Amino acid sequence: MKKRILFCWAGLIGGLIFCAALSAQRQDPDSVMALAQKLAAGEDYKTAISLVTKLNEDHPENLDYKLYLARLYYWSKDYPRALEHLMPLTISEPVLAEAYDLAIQVEYQLEHYPVVIEKCRKGHSLFPAGIPFYHFQEAMALEKTGEDREAVRLLDQIPKSANNHRDAQYLKTQILRKEKNTLAAGYLNTSFYNPGFAPWHLAHLEYFHRNRSIALGGRLNYGHLFGSDAVQVEADAYPRVGKGGYLYLNAGYSGADRIFPRYRLAGEYYQDINRYNFSIGGRYLDFRVQKVQLLTGSAAINFGEWKFGYRNYLLHLESEWFVSHVLNLRRSLERRESYIQLDLQYGGTPYYFFASDAFSRISAWRAGINGMFRMGNHVFIQPVIMYEREEYIPDTYRNRFNFQWIILKRF
């Protein structure tokens, strides 16, 4: 019964549309054009094309009908027919700017990239006011042909006042991200106040190479704590797993007696599902005199340029369990590959795990800001400022300040 009712309603609506179209054809051209535009707005391109085709046949001298018919074919993804209707408009004298620009977009969809490049360069002299448009279209075609450097050069010439500047910056970022190697160096200073004692120093140097299926890297860490020095080496891997998933795998070794764990192992699985991100994993740290196991997991939601996340650490040490909670709020600047993030934490787990006695404190509150900012095309800086108010023995507190600076070069 329900199917019959739905069928009747569908037939009634279809009949009304047909009658409206038939009635419109008897009206003046402006009314027919208005109806076609309304149908196109509702993505009923087939009916709109039928109406405008009749208008074009009845008024062959009207260039607006010819151009709109080409647009309808373009919107309906019938690119060959769109180009067929555009060609006469692009070789006439004078050339119609709107038709010329649309022809470039159609040629791009047909993957005629050399033609797009040629037309864009010719468009500079034909229509100087449209140079930002031609630069962008040419850059898209150049990117498809592998001429990334020239594409970036053109995108940099699009002024901030141009309507397509935001799109140009986004495309530029996508091109720059094709680089597969990164080299980074960083320094972390942890200072203590009230009571205070000698600060901790940690430096690192790392290299990463990535391809479509996996990213591989290595890291050399140097630490100066408690009046002694130590070195640690680490290896990381980020293999992709299925759609929207990847693994973080880590192994490290240090021959020193203090500061770094002798062995370090870590693994975590990450999954993206629409606007949501999830992970679950663990860490193992062998400090010779004590073994530390960490279970961790995270959940985050993306809303526009903002991301809100939560991470939990469950730490097992000397037959006891300690819990830490971390909240973060990130504001991304996707076009510049940059972000700024606020972090809040409560629990025993410190900002950075490296010293064996760093896990002995009872609890701590932590708040800080970190971020990443692109300088130029391939250089990034990552500053971190963290403050911790920690209870390191019962009812005894101290202040801990973490200052970190990382510089990264992509090539």
Image: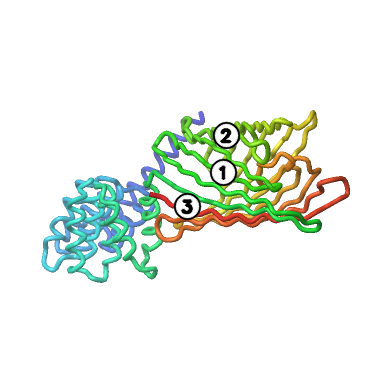
Give percent across and percent down for residue 214: 44, 34
Q: Residue at 62% x, 46% y: name it.
A: 223
- Up the image or down, 273 lies above or below 30; here it is above
The nearer-to-camera label among 1 and 3 is: 1
Give percent across and percent down for residue 208: 45, 42
Q: Amino acid at mark 1?
A: Asn
Tell me whether the residue at label 3 lies in contact with that at label 2, contact meaning CB atoms closer than 8 angstroms: no
Residue 143 versus residue 316: which sits nearer the camera?
316
The numbered dot on residue 221 is 1
The numbered dot on residue 252 is 2
Residue 236 versus residue 222: which sits nearer the camera?
222
Give percent across and percent down for residue 26: 26, 57
The residue sitting at the right extreme is 395
The numbered dot on residue 408 is 3
Q: Closer to the N terminus: mark 3 or mark 2?
A: 2
Regarding residue 245, the answer to whether it shows in the image is: no
Q: Closer to the N terminus: mark 2 or mark 1?
A: 1
Tell me whether the residue at label 2 lies in contact with that at label 1, contact meaning CB atoms closer than 8 angstroms: yes
